[in-house]
Image (cartoon, grey):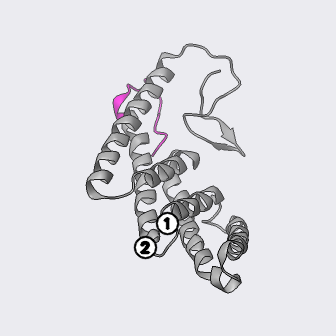
Amino acid sequence: MARDKGVVRGQPVGAYAVSTVPFQSNLQEGTQVVALGISIGILAGIWTWISLTLGIATWPAFVGWSLFFAGGGNAQSIYKAGLPIVTGTLLAWIAVQITPFLGGGTLGLAIAVVIVAFIMTILGLVRGFEFVPAQFASAAAFFGMGGNTAAIARTLLPVLLGVLFGYASAILPQLLTPKKPGTNQSKAA
Protein backbone atom coordinates (compact mmCIF):
# COMPACT_ATOMS: atom_id res chain seq x y z
CA MET A 1 0.00 0.00 0.00
CA ALA A 2 1.27 3.47 -0.84
CA ARG A 3 1.34 6.26 1.67
CA ASP A 4 -0.52 9.42 0.77
CA LYS A 5 -2.09 12.38 2.46
CA GLY A 6 -5.24 10.35 3.18
CA VAL A 7 -8.63 11.83 3.86
CA VAL A 8 -10.93 11.52 6.86
CA ARG A 9 -14.22 13.41 6.63
CA GLY A 10 -12.79 15.41 3.74
CA GLN A 11 -9.66 16.45 5.67
CA PRO A 12 -6.09 15.35 4.88
CA VAL A 13 -4.52 13.39 7.72
CA GLY A 14 -0.81 13.67 7.00
CA ALA A 15 2.11 11.64 5.78
CA TYR A 16 1.27 8.48 7.76
CA ALA A 17 -2.12 7.83 6.18
CA VAL A 18 -2.23 4.62 4.21
CA SER A 19 -4.11 4.59 0.90
CA THR A 20 -5.69 1.66 -0.85
CA VAL A 21 -3.55 2.28 -3.96
CA PRO A 22 -1.10 -0.61 -4.48
CA PHE A 23 2.44 0.32 -3.53
CA GLN A 24 4.59 1.67 -6.30
CA SER A 25 8.17 2.73 -5.77
CA ASN A 26 8.22 6.51 -5.58
CA LEU A 27 11.60 8.09 -4.94
CA GLN A 28 10.16 11.51 -4.08
CA GLU A 29 7.67 9.99 -1.62
CA GLY A 30 10.36 7.81 -0.06
CA THR A 31 12.69 10.77 0.28
CA GLN A 32 9.97 12.75 2.07
CA VAL A 33 9.20 9.90 4.47
CA VAL A 34 12.89 9.40 5.23
CA ALA A 35 13.30 13.16 5.78
CA LEU A 36 10.29 13.15 8.11
CA GLY A 37 11.73 10.19 10.00
CA ILE A 38 15.08 11.93 10.37
CA SER A 39 13.37 15.14 11.48
CA ILE A 40 11.20 13.43 14.07
CA GLY A 41 14.09 11.30 15.32
CA ILE A 42 16.47 14.21 15.76
CA LEU A 43 13.86 16.46 17.39
CA ALA A 44 12.63 13.64 19.65
CA GLY A 45 16.19 13.14 20.85
CA ILE A 46 16.63 16.87 21.41
CA TRP A 47 13.34 17.05 23.34
CA THR A 48 14.30 14.06 25.48
CA TRP A 49 17.63 15.66 26.36
CA ILE A 50 16.02 19.05 27.11
CA SER A 51 13.21 17.60 29.19
CA LEU A 52 15.47 15.35 31.25
CA THR A 53 17.98 18.16 31.74
CA LEU A 54 15.28 20.58 32.91
CA GLY A 55 13.29 18.04 34.90
CA ILE A 56 10.20 18.25 32.67
CA ALA A 57 8.21 15.09 32.01
CA THR A 58 9.23 13.73 28.63
CA TRP A 59 6.26 11.60 27.61
CA PRO A 60 3.45 14.23 27.59
CA ALA A 61 5.23 16.07 24.78
CA PHE A 62 4.80 12.99 22.61
CA VAL A 63 1.06 13.18 23.29
CA GLY A 64 1.07 16.75 21.95
CA TRP A 65 3.31 15.76 19.05
CA SER A 66 0.85 13.03 18.09
CA LEU A 67 -2.07 15.45 18.36
CA PHE A 68 -0.30 17.80 15.95
CA PHE A 69 -0.16 15.09 13.29
CA ALA A 70 -3.62 13.73 14.12
CA GLY A 71 -4.93 17.25 13.67
CA GLY A 72 -3.65 17.42 10.11
CA GLY A 73 0.09 17.95 10.46
CA ASN A 74 0.04 21.57 9.31
CA ALA A 75 0.18 25.04 10.85
CA GLN A 76 -3.57 25.03 11.50
CA SER A 77 -3.05 21.95 13.69
CA ILE A 78 -1.38 24.15 16.30
CA TYR A 79 -4.59 26.14 16.71
CA LYS A 80 -6.80 23.10 16.22
CA ALA A 81 -5.12 21.29 19.14
CA GLY A 82 -4.15 24.20 21.42
CA LEU A 83 -7.48 25.23 22.96
CA PRO A 84 -8.77 21.65 23.32
CA ILE A 85 -5.53 20.64 25.05
CA VAL A 86 -5.91 23.40 27.63
CA THR A 87 -9.63 22.69 28.01
CA GLY A 88 -9.18 18.94 28.47
CA THR A 89 -6.54 19.47 31.13
CA LEU A 90 -8.67 21.98 33.03
CA LEU A 91 -11.79 19.83 32.79
CA ALA A 92 -9.85 16.86 34.16
CA TRP A 93 -8.73 19.06 37.06
CA ILE A 94 -12.36 20.09 37.62
CA ALA A 95 -13.30 16.39 37.74
CA VAL A 96 -10.82 15.91 40.57
CA GLN A 97 -12.12 19.00 42.38
CA ILE A 98 -15.79 17.98 42.24
CA THR A 99 -15.14 14.37 43.25
CA PRO A 100 -15.62 15.05 47.00
CA PHE A 101 -19.01 16.63 46.27
CA LEU A 102 -20.06 13.50 44.41
CA GLY A 103 -19.39 11.16 47.31
CA GLY A 104 -15.61 10.97 46.98
CA GLY A 105 -13.57 7.88 46.36
CA THR A 106 -13.64 5.78 43.25
CA LEU A 107 -17.37 6.18 42.64
CA GLY A 108 -17.23 9.97 43.05
CA LEU A 109 -14.36 10.23 40.59
CA ALA A 110 -16.14 7.92 38.14
CA ILE A 111 -19.24 10.15 38.26
CA ALA A 112 -17.06 13.26 37.80
CA VAL A 113 -15.40 11.65 34.77
CA VAL A 114 -18.84 10.89 33.27
CA ILE A 115 -19.79 14.55 33.61
CA VAL A 116 -16.49 15.86 32.22
CA ALA A 117 -16.41 13.36 29.34
CA PHE A 118 -19.91 14.48 28.37
CA ILE A 119 -18.86 18.14 28.48
CA MET A 120 -15.73 17.48 26.41
CA THR A 121 -17.77 15.65 23.79
CA ILE A 122 -20.48 18.32 23.60
CA LEU A 123 -17.83 21.04 23.35
CA GLY A 124 -16.94 19.47 20.01
CA LEU A 125 -19.96 21.32 18.63
CA VAL A 126 -18.38 24.68 19.50
CA ARG A 127 -15.95 26.37 17.14
CA GLY A 128 -12.40 26.03 18.42
CA PHE A 129 -13.20 22.87 20.40
CA GLU A 130 -13.95 20.54 17.46
CA PHE A 131 -10.81 18.45 17.97
CA VAL A 132 -12.30 16.41 20.80
CA PRO A 133 -9.48 13.79 20.86
CA ALA A 134 -7.11 16.55 22.03
CA GLN A 135 -9.35 17.18 25.04
CA PHE A 136 -9.40 13.50 25.98
CA ALA A 137 -5.67 13.04 25.37
CA SER A 138 -4.73 16.01 27.53
CA ALA A 139 -7.14 14.90 30.26
CA ALA A 140 -5.45 11.49 30.23
CA ALA A 141 -2.03 13.16 30.38
CA PHE A 142 -3.24 15.23 33.36
CA PHE A 143 -4.21 12.08 35.25
CA GLY A 144 -0.93 10.45 34.18
CA MET A 145 0.94 13.40 35.68
CA GLY A 146 -0.69 12.90 39.07
CA GLY A 147 -4.15 14.41 38.68
CA ASN A 148 -3.62 17.25 41.16
CA THR A 149 -3.36 21.02 40.91
CA ALA A 150 0.40 20.90 40.32
CA ALA A 151 -0.24 18.53 37.41
CA ILE A 152 -1.94 21.29 35.41
CA ALA A 153 1.31 23.07 34.53
CA ARG A 154 3.28 19.80 34.48
CA THR A 155 0.82 18.59 31.82
CA LEU A 156 0.23 21.71 29.75
CA LEU A 157 3.87 22.73 29.32
CA PRO A 158 5.13 19.51 27.73
CA VAL A 159 1.94 18.73 25.79
CA LEU A 160 1.85 22.20 24.20
CA LEU A 161 5.61 22.06 23.56
CA GLY A 162 5.00 18.70 21.90
CA VAL A 163 2.58 20.35 19.48
CA LEU A 164 5.29 22.87 18.60
CA PHE A 165 7.88 20.13 18.20
CA GLY A 166 5.39 18.40 15.90
CA TYR A 167 5.19 21.52 13.79
CA ALA A 168 8.99 21.82 13.70
CA SER A 169 9.29 18.18 12.69
CA ALA A 170 6.83 18.76 9.83
CA ILE A 171 8.71 21.85 8.57
CA LEU A 172 12.23 20.42 8.79
CA PRO A 173 11.77 17.80 6.02
CA GLN A 174 10.75 20.56 3.63
CA LEU A 175 14.19 22.02 4.15
CA LEU A 176 15.88 18.61 3.71
CA THR A 177 14.16 17.32 0.57
CA PRO A 178 14.48 18.62 -2.97
CA LYS A 179 11.27 19.97 -4.44
CA LYS A 180 9.92 18.86 -7.79
CA PRO A 181 10.11 21.72 -10.26
CA GLY A 182 6.81 23.60 -10.50
CA THR A 183 5.25 22.15 -7.32
CA ASN A 184 4.46 23.65 -3.96
CA GLN A 185 5.10 21.03 -1.32
CA SER A 186 4.44 23.21 1.70
CA LYS A 187 2.26 20.87 3.77
CA ALA A 188 3.04 22.18 7.23
CA ALA A 189 2.77 25.88 6.44
Work out whether 131 lies above or below 9: below
Q: Position of residue 84 (x, y in %)?
A: 57, 64
Residue for point 38% across, 27% down:
177
In-front residue for pair 91/131: 91
Q: Position of residue 176 (x, y in %)?
A: 34, 30
Work out whether 113 lies above or below 20: below
Tell me if 22 is positioned left or right of 144 in this view. right
Which SS class for mark 1? Answer: loop
Classed neighbour count for the residue bearing mark 2: other residues with Cα under 10 Å, few (<14), some (14–19), many (≥20): few
Residue for point 67% across, 28% down:
19
**Hey, which residue is sitting farthest front in the picture?**
105
Instruction: Residue 170: name its quadrant.
Output: top left
* Residue under numbered circle 1: 146
Using the rendered image of the protein, determine whether residue 32 is visible from the camera's viewpoint: yes
> Would you say residue 184 sits in the magenta stretch?
yes
- Is the C-beta separation of discs 2 and 1 under 8 Å? yes
> Disc number at residue 77?
none
Classed neighbour count for the residue bearing mark 1: other residues with Cα under 10 Å, few (<14), some (14–19), many (≥20): few
* Residue under numbered circle 2: 150
In-front residue for pair 75/87: 87
Which SS class for mark 2? Answer: helix
Amino acid under label 2? Ala
Instruction: Residue 13: name its quadrant.
Output: top right
Amino acid under label 1? Gly
Look at the image and give the residue range highlighted in magenta.
174-189
Work out whether 66 lies above or below 177: below
Tell me if 49 is positioned left or right of 96 in this view. left
Work out whether 52 lies above or below 177: below
Q: Position of residue 71 (x, y in %)?
A: 57, 50
In-front residue for pair 2/42: 42
